[in-house]
């Protein structure tokens, strides 16, 4: 694998981490991030989410939710998701604070507003390297089943991009083939670092 990948969703919990987990398992150089102001997890009601700062270790979230209502968070699959996340990395990271992680070749987002935030952030950064970065949005509902489907589709697309001699020259064909095969519309943009 020659390219560096970033997976980005809102809270760096479900969609980005499912894709990060799967790509890492397949040997990709991959990181993951969230774009939100805080990390939000479902709580006992829609008006009572669990809110954490980025950088809060996944293990801390597990302990906190186990103290609050272990049965609820097991039943809604939040605890198993956090356990998976803790095997991938220490804590959720924020996209807007990732400059120290270096540049990426391909960035995947899983909802349009996150795509817009990533593209805007890249445009606002100092473009020192003038290295191109492909930003792709694959719309994925934020639930565990859809996150698993989205991760497999992301893996397929990453394998296609890796197989290309030059993704810059063949991205239009890769996207068109993917959209036709999977009947999923993609947004994509080429930005620079």
Image: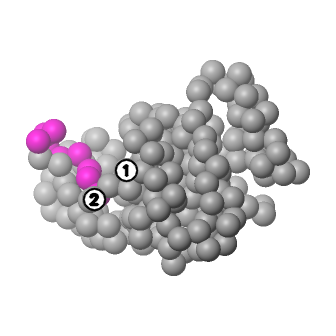
Label 2: few (<14), some (14–19) or many (≥20) C-alpha neighbours in 10 Å: few
Residue under circle 2? 37
Query: Based on the displayed image, in which of its 4 quarters is residue 137 positioned?
Result: top right
Compare residues 63 and 156 and report the one nearer the observer. 156
Q: Position of residue 179 (x, y in %)?
A: 67, 26
Where the C terminus falls, by quadrant? bottom right
**CA gap, disc 2 to disc 1?**
9 Å
Compare residues 86 and 190 and report the one nearer the observer. 190
Residue under circle 1? 10
Query: Based on the displayed image, in which of its 4 quarters is residue 76 positioned?
Result: top left
Q: Position of residue 12 (x, y in %)?
A: 40, 56
Say which residue appears at 42% left-offset and 33% top-offset.
141
Which span is picked out in magenta?
39-47
Label 1: few (<14), some (14–19) or many (≥20) C-alpha neighbours in 10 Å: many
Hey, which residue is sitting farthest bottom in the picture?
Answer: 100
Query: Based on the displayed image, in which of its 4 quarters is residue 68 positioned?
Result: bottom left
Q: Position of residue 6 (x, y in %)?
A: 57, 58
Please give left or right for residue 175 compared with residue 103 in the image: right
Please give left or right for residue 27 compared with residue 85 in the image: right
Please give left or right for residue 153 compared with residue 16 in the image: right
- Secondary structure under tag 1 reads loop
Compare residues 24 and 175 and report the one nearer the observer. 175
Q: Main secondary structure of the magenta part?
A: loop
Visible residue check, residue 126 = yes
């Amino acid at each position: 694998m020659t390219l560096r990948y970033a997976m980005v969703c809102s809270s760096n919990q479900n969609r980005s981490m499912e894709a990060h987990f799967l790509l890492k398992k397949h040997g990709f150089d991959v990181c993951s991030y969230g774009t939100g102001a805080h990390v939000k997890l479902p709580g006992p009601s829609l008006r009572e989410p669990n809110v954490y700062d980025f950088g809060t270790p996944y293990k801390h979230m597990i302990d906190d939710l186990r103290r609050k209502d272990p049965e609820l968070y097991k039943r809604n699959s939040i605890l198993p998701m956090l356990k998976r996340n803790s095997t991938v990395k220490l804590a959720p990271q924020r996209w807007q604070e990732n400059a120290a992680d270096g540049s990426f070749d391909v960035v995947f987002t899983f909802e349009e507003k996150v795509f817009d935030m990533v593209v805007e952030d890249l445009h606002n950064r100092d473009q020192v390297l003038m290295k191109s970065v492909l930003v792709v949005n694959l719309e994925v509902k934020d639930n565990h089943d859809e996150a698993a489907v989205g991760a497999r589709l992301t893996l397929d697309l990453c394998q296609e991009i890796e197989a290309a001699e030059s993704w810059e020259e063949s991205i239009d064909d890769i996207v068109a083939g993917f959209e036709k095969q999977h009947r999923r519309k993609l947004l994509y943009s080429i930005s620079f670092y």
